[in-house]
Amino acid sequence: MKINWGTGIVLALVGFISFILYFVVRMGLDDRANHDLVTEEYYKAELGYQKEIDAEKNANKNARITMDRTPDGLVLNFPEKLDPKKIKGTVSLYRPSNKHLDFDLPVSLSNTHLLIPDKRLLDGRWDIKVSWQYGDELYMHKESLTY
């Protein structure tokens, strides 16, 4: 049987399209390709975003947090002008590469600093969000660091 040019071109196109569709379907159904969202309930989180902006402005004006690396871990230094016993909140550590390493710590201080132990922080990038309340004011500090 003799194949002419038209039949050859059609067979080549059908073969190429089949090849591409095979990989599209394979990658769409493969469990190794994890397609997680950054946050589980994205739209609910988006509604509270203005509160976060206001809390960050409060922190930048009135109560700035500094972070220092020590051999024991990461130390969060709260402003000394504030009474540490009245500061309540949470520290959220988010690992962009692996959501199973994310964790939250409560902020309850007896002095002006909080230590995050070195054993909890694996090497790599961490997004840290400190949200706390002092009196009726909300404050927030966000920072990314490579540990």
Image (cartoon, rainbow, N blue to C red):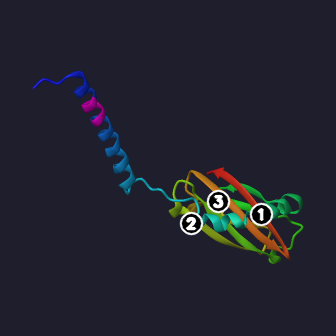
Asked if residue 45 lies in the magenta stretch, the reply is: no
Spatial separation of the CA atoms under disc 3 and disc 1: 32 Å
Q: What residue type is labelled 3?
A: Gly
Between 43 and 6, which is closer to the camera in this rendering? 6
* Residue 73: image tag: 3
The 10 Å Cα crowd at callout 3, few under 14, some 14 to 19, many 20 or more, is some
**Numbered disc 1: secondary structure:** helix
Residue segment shown in magenta: 10-14
Q: Tags 3 and 1 in contact by the CB under 8 Å rule?
A: no
Counting residues from the start of the chain, the first of labels 1 and 2 encountered is 2
Residue 109 locus on image (x, y percent)? 76, 74
Residue at 83% across, 62% down:
59
Residue under pointer 2: 40
- Residue 50 badge: 1
Q: What element carries label 3?
A: strand
For the residues carrying marks 3 and 1, which lies nearer the camera in this image? Answer: 1
Q: Give the vertical position of 24 relative to 80 (above or below).
A: above
Establish if 91 lies above or below 3: below
Q: Which of 102 and 52 is in front in this view?
A: 52
Please report the residue visible at 84 percent of the width from the left and 64 percent of the height from the top: 79
Which mark is first along the chain, 1 or 3? 1
| Structural distance between the alpha carbons of marks 1 and 2 | 19 Å
